[in-house]
Amino acid sequence: MKTNTLKHNLIGDKKFYRHVLAIVFPLIVQNTITNVVSLLDNVMVGSVGTLQMSAVAIVNQLIFVFNLCIFGGLAGAGIFSTQYAGAKDDDGVRYCFRMKVYIGTVMFAIATVIFTAFATPLVSSYLAEDTTAADAAATLSYGLDYLKIMVIGLLPFTVSQIYASTLRELGETKLPMIASIAAIFVNLVFNYILIFGKFGFPCLGVSGAAIATVMSRFVEAIIIIVAVTVKRKKFTFIKGAFRRFYIPGKLCKDIFTKGMPLLVNEFLWSAGMAVLLQCYSVRGLDVVAAVNISNTINNLFNVVFLSMGVALGVVVGQYLGAEEEEKAKTAVWRLIALSIVLCLIIGGIMALLAPVIPDIYNTENHVKEMATKFLFIVAGLMPIFSFSHCCYFTLRSGGRTILTFVFDSVFTWGVVVPFAYCLARFTSIAIVPLFFAVQSLEFLKCIVGFILVKKGLWIRNIISE
């Protein structure tokens, strides 16, 4: 009987997997194409030079902080929006959408000021002390040129995330996928044209890569806005969304209360990842280049468990909103099991390809070898990262945002960052075992995540409280 119960908890029927597939497949396609193009962008910039690639990697790490802050800032309203969608409450979804507009506008303004006023010290903080003056100056110059243009793309990125996140919370993942694919095509084509100066265009190097990315951001935002407006009968939340900007006071307060920990969490976690790269950069710009190669390739293979996390949040959140708690509990373990199995397969494929993929980069052999070793490490740990990622979205789906904050950011800043900082600055341990030691800390996070999910503290219908 126990075996049957275990099987029931971990393996769903065809109807369950069809429902999950309808949500997760467009996400996987979208994220895969995005990361393939990111890989090609990386290769194209890398072919110009290692210093250019390092400069772009540094700036992209800074932009990554903003991107995750947007995700975190919108996530608070998204928790409510998902449960409203499960309860078939259009007004509730519309209020959450308006709240996202307010939050996104404020965050865009703050980020623009920071990236404009503090560009030089931000980029300079990643330049190791033993870097030659000429290399440091060149890397800084490339980085500032790239960042100056990328700031323009913050607005369309914010707008597209406001719309796309709301659509996903409704279970609509195809439209964001189509918009993203179109944007990716624009990015890829103009990267090639502007980086290398093809078809009569000037050869702009890293600036060309930035211009292409900004163009793609505008294309994505325009497609989503137009499609949602045209299909307003299907996406009913948009009807009257801009006619007035009223949000019930209690809901506004609840979103702020639940959302603030998520915003702070995403900021601190992404800042922690930026500091982690800075810790690695103490060992030289070659390490930055190798980590950049590894991360770019790793992101391509991580799309499955990252997409599974989003799908878990949507499926479980809608069950909670519809007050189907038992279905929510069962869905969590089934989705975690599915994600781990998929990552065992994907991680194995990644490990097999790790020795050859870095060869597509036009950089020094020792950088490629270092990147290969990093890839072996993250491939082996992929199921572990998958488990902790699913635990994070499970806790978030029920509005347990303080728990998610402790689980994610407190762990990052209380354990991972100090550990990496001490190893990088106060020991002579080689970079590869250092990288392995830091990444292996995810085991501790999984233990905590398992306990929290099993206790069921996340099971709450927050829209009816």
Image (cartoon, helix red, strand yellow):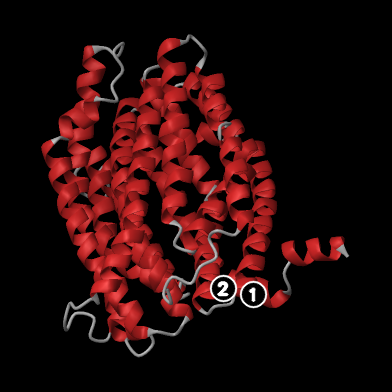
> For numbered disc 1, what is the local secondary structure?
helix
Please tell me which residue is depicted at 49% across the width and 76% down the height of the picture: 321
State the image coordinates of residue 24 (x, y, percent, origin top left): 55, 65
Mark drawn on residue 18: 1
Provide residue 119's location: percent of width, then percent of height: 17, 35
Q: Is residue 52 above or below residue 332?
A: above
Q: Do labels 1 and 2 touch, CB within 8 Å? A: yes
Q: Quadrant of the N terminus?
A: bottom right
Front residue of 156 and 178: 156
User: Does 29 sit above or below residue 146?
Assistant: below
Horizontally, residue 100 falls left or right of residue 460, namely left
Amino acid, disc 1: Arg
Q: Is residue 450 visible?
A: yes
How crowded pointer 2 is (Cα within 10 Å; few <14, some 14-19, many 20+) is rated as: some
Is residue 369 toward the left or the right of residue 293 in the image?
Answer: right
Nearer to me, 233 or 310 = 310
Extreme-bottom residue of the structure? 233
Does residue 158 sit above or below 169 in this rendering? above
Farthest residue in the right direction?
1
Which residue sits furthest front?
A: 465
Residues under labels 1 and 2: Cα distance?
A: 6 Å
Mark 2, residue position: 22
